[in-house]
Image: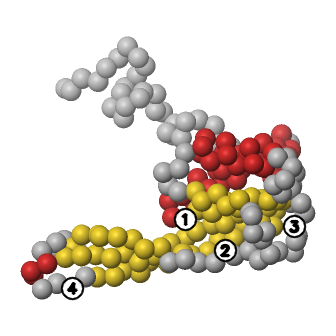
Amino acid sequence: MENYKKSKIVEKPSPLPFTNLPSDIIEMKVKDGSKIRNLMGYAIGKMESDSVRQILFTGSGKAISKTITCVEIMKRRLKGLHQITKVLFKQTEEIWEPIVPEAGLDALTVKRNIPAICVLLSKDALDSQEPGYQAPGSFDAFWIETLKAESQGQIKRKQGGGRGPGHTGKHPRSVGGRGESYKKP
């Protein structure tokens, strides 16, 4: 591949994994370089209006974690949202051109399957039998149960900084407290 350079990336169009979506649904296409503040400012503004009942967040590749972050922020700001999450793969084609065209090399096409996520948030109830469905407040119920278990002492965590017994200094060669320093013999 040292004799080639990437000339372009073509993302194959793929249908959305949801059926019966309204034609005017707002689709937030989250990219790796998208700013969460900009995405959320627009999305929350639209969802706070009475006319918008659903919003769809999509992201692929490196933008998946940013997409999930946007969805979680939206669910925190606007209580009572129903959620359906779908995970899928999008196909992309990378076209690699030879650096030196006179070398007799052909252009290469590399097909990749990139992971992607689509999250539908709705103010109205969705089909609870649909795979990937999360009811409003199910997140809070999980954490309430976890906190109860911790307070009752069922979950115990190891105390200490993870460095093991006997480590007092910042560096591995430190001998004592702050005033002492390590000297070679």
In whole angstroms, how far apart are the C-alphas of marks 4 and 2?
35 Å
Image quadrant containing the N terminus: bottom left
Number of other residues with Cα within 10 Å of mark 1, as a class: few under 14, some 14 to 19, many 20 or more = many
Read off the residue under disc 2: 16
Name the mark nearer the viewer: 1 or 4.
4
In whole angstroms, how far apart are the C-alphas of marks 1 and 3?
24 Å
Residue 65: percent from left, percent from top: 58, 56
Residue 157: percent from left, percent from top: 68, 43
The label number, if any, that marks residue 106 in the structure image: 4
Q: Earlier in the sequence, mark 1 or mark 2?
A: 2
Point 51% across, 64% down: residue: 61
Q: Mark 1: which secondary structure?
A: strand
Under mark 2, the amino acid is: Leu
Q: Farthest residue in the top direction?
A: 179
Q: Mark 2: which secondary structure?
A: loop
Residue 96: percent from left, percent from top: 28, 75
Point 74% across, 58% down: residue: 55
Number of other residues with Cα within 10 Å of mark 4, as a class: few under 14, some 14 to 19, many 20 or more = few
